[in-house]
Amino acid sequence: MPLNKTIERARKDKKQGKSASTQAGEFVREEIETIRKGVHGARSAKQAIAIGLSKARRAGVKLAPPKRGTTSEATRKKAVKDLKSAGSREKPSAKRSRATMKALKKESGAAASKKALSQQARTAARKRTPAQRSAAAKKAARTRKAEK
């Protein structure tokens, strides 16, 4: 369950007209903090990010599921299911939640280290074309909050 301050930050982002991925970034940040605090671990930085994105979708962020062929079909189906369950009051299975937490508690916290996240970011960037990377950098510079 995401923290209320995370949901508020995501709502603020939405109100400012920021993209769904920026809104979802708040949930990913929360997940990284959770792992760093030692509440649970993750097998990899990729898994930590996936957990954050899943929480974002369930919290109502309109984040599109991954395109076919980019991830497994199971991951895609889970993303679609998370989007549909947004705002639903249906309680998740306690048995399943406990099993998931038990498995995550056994994992290492190294997935949220600076090195692991940096490596993940570089790997993701390498999959993009130079033009895409350049466009992302230009947009970041254009939309960066002005320093006081």
Image: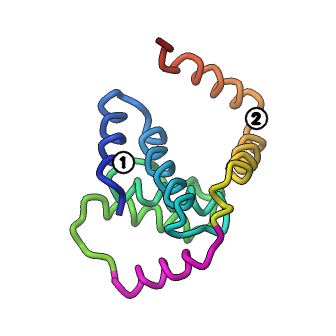
Label for residue 6?
1
Can you say which quadrant of the picture contains the N terminus?
bottom left
Position above or below: 143 against 87: above
Position above or below: 90 against 3: below
For label 2, the crowd category at 10 Å Cα-Cα, with few meaning under 14, some 14 to 19 and many 20 or more, is few
- Callout 2: SS: loop
Q: In the image, what residue occupies the spot 29% across and 31% down?
A: 15
Residue that sits furthest to the top in the current view: 148
Q: In the image, what residue occupies the spot 66% across and 60% down?
A: 111
Query: Of 119 and 35, which appears nearest the observer?
Result: 35
Which span is picked out in magenta?
93-108
| 119 in the magenta segment | no
- Callout 1: SS: helix
Q: Amino acid at mark 1?
A: Thr
Position above or below: 3 against 132: below
Query: Which one is in front in this view, the residue at disc 1 or the one at disc 2?
Result: 1
Q: Main secondary structure of the magenta part?
A: helix
Q: Amino acid at mark 2?
A: Thr
Q: In the image, what residue occupies the spot 50% across and 48% down?
A: 29
- The residue beneath circle 2 is 129
Query: Of 101 and 131, which appears nearest the observer?
Result: 101
What percent of the width, then of the height, locates residue 103?
55, 80
Residue that sits furthest to the front in the current view: 37
What percent of the width, then of the height, locates residue 19?
44, 35
Q: In the image, what residue occupies the spot 51% across and 82% down?
A: 102
